[in-house]
Image (spheres, rainbow, N blue to C red):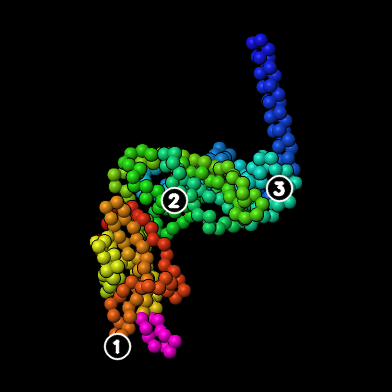
Amino acid sequence: MKNFRFVLLLALSCCFSLSQAQDLQKIEKEKLKLELFEEEPFHTPLSEKYTGKVVFSKEELTRELPESKYINTYTLGDKLSIRAYFEHSVANSMLIQLVESGKKAKEVNQNKSWFKTKSKYLIFLYLDGNEIAGTSYAEDFSEESMTSFLSLRADLNDGTEKIFFGESLYKALLLKQDVLTPGKHKLRFEFVPIKTWSYGSDFKYQPIAVGEIDMIVPKEIKLNTTDCFPQKVLDDPKLEQEALKATKVLFKTNAANALKAILPFQDVYIIRDEYGNIVKKSFMAAIACKSDKEVWYDYYIFDKMYDGTKYLDAVVSKDITLNGYTTPSGKNVHKDCLKFLK
């Protein structure tokens, strides 16, 4: 009886393996029928060595950067550039994955044109195995970069005040203050294709490039001002003080939470009634705040009412828009950002 069971299991195993092999053969035949986008003729020893991987450097990671400039360890706060090498372009990778999932090449080919204009990719960041953030779905990429390019780059932190693609991940990482303990941690990056609309947009695509780097968290993290609060555009100390005072009145019992007003927009608008008479002038300001556990900033609209002879001190407006614009969303920032408020 035992021998019979063994033979039966062996036979079933062989049948499963044969069926699996036949399925793989069918998929490979379907893949040969795919009408892929023309890809750039980009092949170097480095691109072949690191196909499907993400590499890292403290320098701008151009394609020409030698491998000797690649790094395996990074200190949080330093510059970090990343580059992904793909076996196929982002759009072609999606076409291939759809066929590998069981879709017929004919069906995929008929919908190929949508991938030319609706292909994007996201970068997902993991810290010690836990997902931290992903880049925005709102990012735009050229058709050529999605259909042709076999390598793409981004910055986690370029060390300047400009915010380049990928640096939103860095800002999200800085907020994980409870787990950014001094010492060694592991960062993982995944480049994942997405189809934003129509055919193939409901499919969960697999990463086309993955990379990990050891990250050292120092006792004091090096921060730029742009890692923290909005930058002052309008220099008006009196207006800043009025906005801060008005916010503290609004907060009442939590007035101590409001630390500083920042004027990140140049315009102060004069508001008139239907007869052309001045009613008030209004502006937006960002208010930096803190509590025992958090540091953040929020935007508010402020009004300086006109009494016929002069403008009164600013108060927080009841309006939700100013000149057609709503206030931007506030954000939490790292606790060490407080040093920039001095």
Q: Between disc 2 and disc 3, whose residue precedes?
A: 3
Instruction: Select label 3 or label 1 by which is in front.
Output: 1
Name the kind of residue labelled 3 in the image: Val
Disc assigned to residue 169: 2
Tell me the residue at 66%/40% (across/down): 101
Q: Is residue 206 visible?
A: yes
Which residue is disc 3 drawn over? 108
Magenta part of the chain: 270-280
Q: Residues within 10 Å of mark 3 (few under 14, many from 20)?
A: many
Is 32 situated left or right of 148 in this image? Answer: right
Is 132 situated left or right of 89 in this image? Answer: left
Q: CA distance from mark 3 to mark 1?
A: 71 Å
Residue 69 image position (x, y, % from top left): 45, 43
Is 255 situated left or right of 325 in this image? Answer: left
Residue 301 image position (x, y, % from top left): 37, 71
Q: CA distance from mark 2 to mark 3?
A: 33 Å
Tell me the residue at 66%/52% (across/down): 199
| Image quadrant assignment for residue 323 | bottom left
Q: Quadrant of the C terminus?
A: bottom left
Instruction: Select label 1 or label 2 by which is in front.
Output: 1
Which residue is disc 1 drawn over? 309
Q: Between disc 1 and disc 2, whose residue precedes?
A: 2
| Image quadrant assignment for residue 144 | bottom right
Name the kind of residue labelled 2 in the image: Leu
Q: Relative to residue 285, is residue 190 depicted above or below? A: above
Q: What is the secondary structure assignment of the residue under circle 2?
A: helix
Residue 18 image position (x, y, % from top left): 71, 26
Name the kind of residue labelled 1 in the image: Thr
Q: What is the secondary structure assignment of the residue under circle 3?
A: helix
